[in-house]
Amino acid sequence: MKNGLLKFITCGSVDDGKSTLIGHMLYDAKLIFADQERALELDSKVGSREGKIDYSLLLDGLMAEREQGITIDVAYRYFTTERRSFIVADTPGHEEYTRNMAVGASFAELAVILVDAAQGILVQTRRHARICSLMGIRHFCFAVNKMDLVHYQEYAYKKIEKEIRKLAIDLDLMSVTVIPVSATEGDNVTKKSIPMSWYHGKTLLEYLEEVNIDIGTEEEGFVMPVQRVCRPNHMFRGYQGQVAAGCISEGDSLTVLPSGESAEVQSILLTDREVKTVKKGDPVTIQLNKEIDVSRGCVFVRGTQIKVSNMFSASLLWMDDSELVQGKNFLIKIGTKLLPATVMKVKYKVDIHTGEHLRASKLYKNEIAVCDIVTAEEIVYDTFTKHKDIGCFVLIDRVTNMTSACGVIRHSLRRSENIVWQKLDITREIRAVKMGQRPVTLWFTGLSGAGKSALANEIEKALSISGRYTMLLDGDNVRMGLNSNLGFEEQDRIENIRRIAEVAKLMNDAGLIVLTSFISPFKNDRERARAIVGEENFIEIYVSTPLEECEKRDVKGLYKKARNGEIPNFTGISSPYEEPERAEIRIDTTEVSLEEAVKYVLGEIENYINKNNKRCDL
């Protein structure tokens, strides 16, 4: 009887022999074509093994990989033996490419972690084991490689095996097997090793063919995140997605989250065929017996309790080159839902060597930590141990669209369940009608001395004279009260802008036109403020006066102090200012009077409001 498909990953430190191991397995098991075998033999003649076959070339296909002798990107291989089918992800060992390794781990059910017999467990070995555990891999095979370099000594193997068993206890690994191998010579890869006759266990291929990965993996109930609403005509409305857990049959009752509405399954399509029942992994279209509010990001559930809230604690791997600071805003993707989220707090990071929990307020590339995260609205999720598909997530940089982190949900935060938004009878719309105005936030940004505060002050006076109800939030004034506890480090600046945006939103809800005058130098922070206030209510006004002109004005003498090193982290001198790329209004105050600037900006505000997001330059 043939076992089911096994998806596994090979990982470990640099030059531990991951690609060589899988290449030798494919070669010995006759799982490559004749032309591939001939090409391998020819390529090996100019390789690094003095004409002997270099099995790693079967996996390392990039020119840079072959030149450097390392794996850079994830290489996927599909192969079948008489007893099982496999998909293997051969991942890079270099710390620089940990992101790529994590991608491979996210799809795998089992990890083959290589350990160099001559060097033992290294930092990257520990990091990869922790990442695999973080990604929910429960079955681990540690291949102690290069046994030929330690003369196949049982003592050398036993010493490393002891280290591995200790690591398995530290990481609470569920299923661990240790096999001594030589990837280059083929010992215990597909055939029993003669020089290691003291080893009586299975070869690596035998282990992979026989291991049972289904033990303890059953998830409770039925879960299906909705990927798409299908409406080919007015007679049919179907909800498409992949079944993440359980099974469902025609006539069963389903609940849709987050709304909590219920309906019965009227029909099920598996691709283009109508069926009565579907199970985990099936791509399906479900039609319900009545119309309810369902859209992309909603989740169908049955027979299980799933969380609906906006705060949770999570373990994450930080993969970005820039550091993570508390208060930073991202897009988060959980299941099929994408929405803004903020890392509220870094609770601790994990020491790769010892597993110790270390206090931290920042994270650097490839560090693992536990953080508290809040989303912009309620989202459907569960803990990773209960439901994998809606218990993992990625954080996406809002400016670059790069994946900055991946993580798994540990538990919901109790405060999210105890705090409920209070709906009020007097709404924002009622207040706006009563005041006879459209409440918006006018976000003035630019260098110190650019003229933001003077311009915002005069515009507020003009709006007030015309009968508008306004409130001006100035950077210095706010820092003397609401934000007096914040400094000028990056995380303090992020929190400064977040608080201002939240206050501006509340004042908009009160019906007021809010003017803010802040340097707000970073694109991410301004985009976050835009998300908090709301795209339709946010008008960014970039006062683009050049640095040279701002220094000439230097009313407060700040530039002079910054040049002398008396003020650290001063925007434009020792800290960067990132120019807005999509400001609705831009104005350089160098060549215009204050009266002309006010007249121009007021005119552009009216144009923007009346002419559907028209962006303007002076």
Image (tube, rainbow, N blue to C red):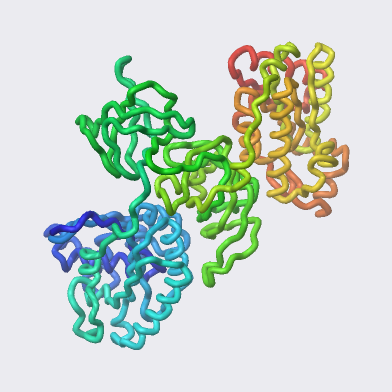
Residue 53 vertical placement versus 193 (above, below)? above
Say which quarter of the image contains residue 174: bottom left
Left or right placement of residue 558 versus residue 130 in this view? right
Quadrant containing the C terminus is top right
Say which quarter of the image contains residue 184: bottom left
Residue 559 in percent (x, y) is at: 82, 44
Residue 5 in percent (x, y) is at: 23, 54
Residue 449 in percent (x, y) is at: 81, 35
Find the residue positioned furthest to the right. Answer: 556
For residue 399, say whether it is visible.
Answer: no
Residue 271 in percent (x, y) is at: 24, 33
Looking at this view, is 591 or 109 the one in front?
109
* Residue at 42% across, 51% down: 386
* Residue at 62% across, 42% down: 418
Quadrant containing the N terminus is bottom left
* Residue at 25% across, 86% down: 198
For residue 339, say whether it is visible.
Answer: yes
Left or right placement of residue 541 versus residue 64 in this view? right
Looking at this view, is 104 or 54 the one in front?
104
Tally the marks.
Answer: 0
Residue 86 vertical placement versus 274 (above, below)? below
Say which quarter of the image contains residue 374: top right
